[in-house]
């Protein structure tokens, strides 16, 4: 049978219970001690009473009214012998009970506060940059302390994940920039040395490398704006179906070059959103489809207004689909479908991370899935502005 622990009670309840228990225990111990000592004094006093006072005491115990003078002598004798000793016993018992309750209270307080000491030590470790610090949830913790420990562990895990991601991103950025910069430097140095002739084709190749660097910088800027919550600046009421239809029309040469046949199911879907960011997200999905799913031959685009007013944009293809760890695809920047990270297909590898950031900035999220029979599904969920949606339903 599981023993009860502090964690099932709030800290205020535990504190009040401990204080009340200590008060009751202190008063009870003092009362018992004084009562026992008073009985002991009474017994010793009655044994040493003068004969006349002893006779009066026996008469009182037998229910007989004693002589007035004898009764007065009895009371005077008991009062003289016992008052000071009883007062002294009250002081001694009170101090003893207070000391006992203080010892018990300190013990209980240390049991309650000990997780805070561990938490303080772990926080100091975290401050020094060691994000692996964790605190075990003690069964003796109160509800608030247990919640605090769980929140601390979650924060430490988040910081550790962010550190690992930052380390990975730094290596990925260095990896992405190294090759185009090396090509630019080598080609330009060769032209200056007269090794390479200055031709239009050479300049055109160098310009492609510069454009690739520009796209990486712009995608990184988009992600930094998302972190600062400045990605969505200008919201307006728009029909996502019309936006996607216009993008498909402008991207027709790109889709034709990838030999993709486009199918659409564009239902009216109104939402308050930043149209430029929605276009950026859809273009990124189309570019990914052209780059990785051209072998499938088919691409399907859908828009839908959900019953709760939210909007979803889906892009479905018949390509190779996503790997098993789908979350790493959108969360880790510079992810590429090509395991060798070859640049033969182009792209920065930031596409899905940018799409995810745009979806989150609109209060939504990005969902990735594999289709039955092969292919991938990418769905952008955009959250409707409740005020605007209520006005739209009423109009």
Image: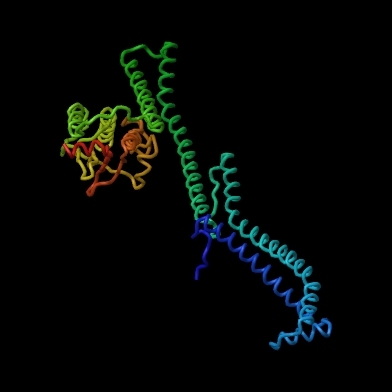
**Residue 73 percent across, percent down from the top left:** 80, 78
Q: Quadrant of residue 223?
A: top left
Work out whether residue 277 or residue 201 is closer to the camera in this orientation and state it. 277
The residue located at (26%, 39%) in the rendering is 386
Work out whether residue 323 or residue 263 is closer to the camera in this orientation and state it. 263
Q: Quadrant of residue 384?
A: top left
Is any part of residue 371 visible from this angle?
yes
Left or right for 163, reference 394: right
Left or right for 66, reference 166: right
**Residue 199 percent across, percent down from the top left:** 33, 12
Work out whether residue 316 or residue 19 is closer to the camera in this orientation and state it. 19
- Colour treatment of the image: rainbow
Work out whether residue 102 or residue 82 is closer to the camera in this orientation and state it. 82
Relative to 90, is 286 above or below? above
Relative to 39, is 130 above or below? above
**Residue 12 percent across, percent down from the top left:** 52, 55
The residue located at (39%, 38%) in the rendering is 332
Is any part of residue 300 visible from this angle?
no
Count of all numbered marks drawn on residues in the image:
0
**Residue 296 percent across, percent down from the top left:** 21, 40
Left or right for 46, reference 291: right
Quadrant in which the C terminus is drawn: top left
Q: Quadrant of residue 39?
A: bottom right
Relative to 138, is 303 above or below? above
Relative to 225, is 23 above or below? below
The residue located at (56%, 39%) in the rendering is 129
């Amino acid at each position: 049978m599981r023993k009860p622990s502090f964690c099932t009670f709030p800290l205020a309840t535990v504190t009040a219970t401990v204080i009340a228990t200590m008060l009751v225990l202190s008063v009870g111990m003092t009362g018992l001690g004084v009562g026992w000592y008073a009985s002991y004094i009474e017994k010793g006093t009655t044994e040493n009473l003068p004969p006349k006072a002893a006779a009066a005491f026996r008469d009182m115990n037998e229910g007989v009214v004693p002589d007035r003078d004898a009764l007065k002598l009895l009371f005077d004798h008991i009062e003289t012998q016992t008052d000071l000793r009883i007062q002294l016993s009250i002081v001694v018992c009170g101090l003893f009970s207070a000391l006992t309750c203080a010892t018990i209270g300190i013990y209980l307080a240390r049991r309650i506060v000990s997780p805070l000491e561990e938490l303080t030590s772990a926080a100091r470790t975290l401050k020094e940059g060691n994000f692996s610090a964790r605190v075990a949830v003690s069964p003796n913790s109160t509800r608030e302390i247990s919640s605090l420990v769980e929140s601390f562990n979650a924060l430490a895990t988040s910081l550790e994940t962010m550190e690992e991601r930052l380390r990975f991103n730094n290596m990925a950025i260095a990896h992405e920039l190294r090759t185009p910069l090396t090509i630019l430097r080598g080609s330009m140095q060769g032209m200056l040395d007269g090794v390479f002739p200055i031709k239009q084709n050479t300049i055109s190749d160098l310009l492609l490398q510069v454009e690739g660097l520009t796209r990486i910088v712009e995608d990184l800027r988009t992600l930094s704006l998302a972190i600062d919550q400045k990605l969505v600046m200008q919201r307006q009421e728009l029909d996502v179906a019309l936006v996607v239809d216009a993008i498909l029309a402008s991207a027709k040469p790109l889709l034709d070059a990838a030999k993709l046949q486009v199918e659409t199911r564009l239902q009216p879907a109104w939402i308050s959103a930043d149209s430029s960011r929605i276009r950026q997200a859809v273009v990124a999905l189309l570019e990914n489809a052209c780059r990785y799913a051209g072998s499938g031959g088919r691409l399907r685009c859908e828009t839908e207004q959900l019953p709760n007013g939210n909007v979803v944009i889906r892009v479905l293809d018949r390509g190779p689909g996503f790997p098993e760890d789908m979350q790493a695809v959108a969360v880790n920047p510079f992810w590429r479908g090509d395991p060798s990270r070859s640049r033969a297909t182009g792209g920065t590898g930031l596409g899905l991370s940018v799409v995810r950031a745009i979806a989150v900035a609109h209060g939504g999220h990005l969902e990735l899935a594999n289709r039955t029979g092969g292919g991938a599904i990418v769905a952008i969920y955009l959250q409707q502005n409740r005020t605007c949606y209520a006005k739209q339903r009423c109009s």
